[in-house]
Image (tube, rainbow, N blue to C red):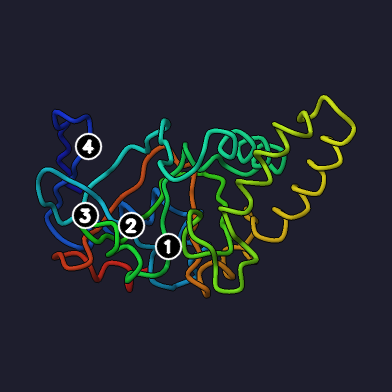
Amino acid sequence: MRLNKYITESGEKEIRIENIKQLRDIIKKDCKPYLKLLKGRKPLFRGIETEKWYHAGIKNVRKDRFSRLMGLAMLEFMDKYLKSKNLPLRKESMICTSNEGHIRMFGGQRCFVFPIGKFKYAMVRSSDMNFSNSNRTWAPDELSSRISDYYTYFGGEKTEEGREEKTDLYEHLDKSIDGNSQKAFNEAYKNSYEMWFDCKQYYYVHVSGEFSGVYVMF
């Protein structure tokens, strides 16, 4: 198999391949856990910003993402919660969805994504962690207010009231956050929930590019 790779100035690895069968073989070899989760369904989608247009490529996952819509208190609390559940931190992960229409909101090239190697993954029962879902079982603004009170008025884990509030908050989060199981993946895929994967790298394939049909070959 002939495969050429090179490094761009931004540090991204871009791949050039001669035909779709080569790409299929690469993904089958490097993305076995992900393909097992998909079970023949379309890959997840993500909007990707690239300086140049390629049919397919490799991206490194940023480990220093910062949510502009979440306050620091909520970010800190969510990180502690996710670690306690052995779920990946959103700020260190690749975020994606089964809903191609949703990623149009954020611009960039619409791409299928294929996490490489082993990973942990999580989902939130909403189209986006920053948005409330339709029945408001996930309402980040209200949750952020509660978390702020937890630190400000309850004293965090330093007081008994704070520890009780933390338990209540964790139970509340358990109703909306899940991951690391086929059941959780299936639910998120079916309902177009936001998912995130803590892989180090992933392949992307443009949905309108020459190799967009590669997913039917698995």
Drawn side of residue 65 relative to residue 19, left or right: right
Residues at circles 1 and 4 in contact by the CB criterion of under 8 Å: no
Q: How far from the left and from the top, in percent, is residue 208?
A: 17, 68
Image quadrant assignment for residue 61: top left
What kind of element bears circle 4? strand
Mark 3 or 2: the one toward you: 3
- Identify residue type, mark 2: Arg
First-in-chain label (1 vs 2): 2
- Identify residue type, mark 1: Thr
First-in-chain label (1 vs 4): 4
Q: CA distance from mark 3 to mark 2?
A: 9 Å
Could you classify mark 1 by the number of other residues whose Cα lies within 10 Å: few (under 14), some (14-19), or many (20 or more)? many
Residues at circles 1 and 2 in contact by the CB criterion of under 8 Å: yes
Q: Which residue bears the numbered disc 2?
A: 46
Q: Which residue shows up at 20% across the image and 57% down it?
A: 109
Q: Which residue bears the numbered disc 4?
A: 13
Mark 4 or 2: the one toward you: 2
